[in-house]
Image (cartoon, grey):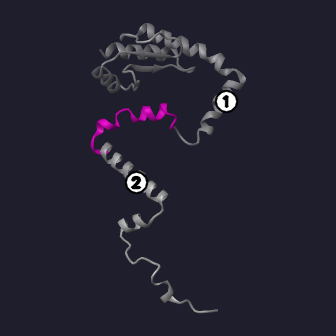
Amino acid sequence: MQPLQTSALAGTVSSNLSIFDLFLQSDSIVKMVMLILLLASFWSWAVIFDKTLARRIDNRLKQAGQLPSKARFLAAPFIGMLEDGAYLRHAPHANAMAKKLAAAMPFPVAHPVEANTVFVTMDGPALERLHAAGWFVYRFLDGTVRFVCSWATSEAAVEELAEALRAVP
């Protein structure tokens, strides 16, 4: 076995290891990834310092499908509901509860109630008062506030919510 000749390797390795020199010596794909990460960092700091940029990011991520990566585990109950017809058995109840909520709604209903969701026009202070009363609902992208009923929504829960809504304005 021959000893390693360090004098032969001396000219091949750069002695300057600054971040800028490492960037310049890197491959084009590495440069591209580093630039994307740098831009993402600037955007993150912009959101941290300017909270108006972060407005509705959570809703946009949900609507874009950026939910948990293990969605197959979340989807399993839905597959079961679709396969055995449970969805068709339980949907009419959720739809009826939404219609009952819309009928009791003290705020203007913005869209026809055709399924289990009620969209209403509600100003910011009223929405804040509703949140302060312990009810949390989301403002939808068109500015309306969304109420969703499920197969488990009881008539008592709809009446309790309607009473809370009447106390808000």
For badge 1, the amino acid type reads Ile
> What residue is at 49 percent from the left and 33 percent from the top?
64
Tell me the magenta residue range: 48-66
- Which residue is outermost to the bottom? 2
Q: Picture coordinates of residue 125 (x, y %)?
A: 27, 22
Which quadrant of the figure contains the C terminus?
top left
**Distance between the alpha carbons at the discs numbered 2 and 1:** 41 Å
Q: Within 10 Å of the Cα at label 2, are there few (<14), some (14-19), or many (20+) other Cα atoms?
A: few
The label number, if any, that marks residue 79 in the structure image: 1
**Going by the image, does 44 lie left or right of 6?**
left
Q: Picture coordinates of residue 61 (x, y %)?
A: 46, 35
For badge 2, the amino acid type reads Leu
Residue at disc 2, secondary structure: helix
Q: Picture coordinates of residue 162 (x, y %)?
A: 41, 13
Q: Earlier in the sequence, mark 2 or mark 1?
A: 2
Can you say whether 122 is above or below 28 in the image? above
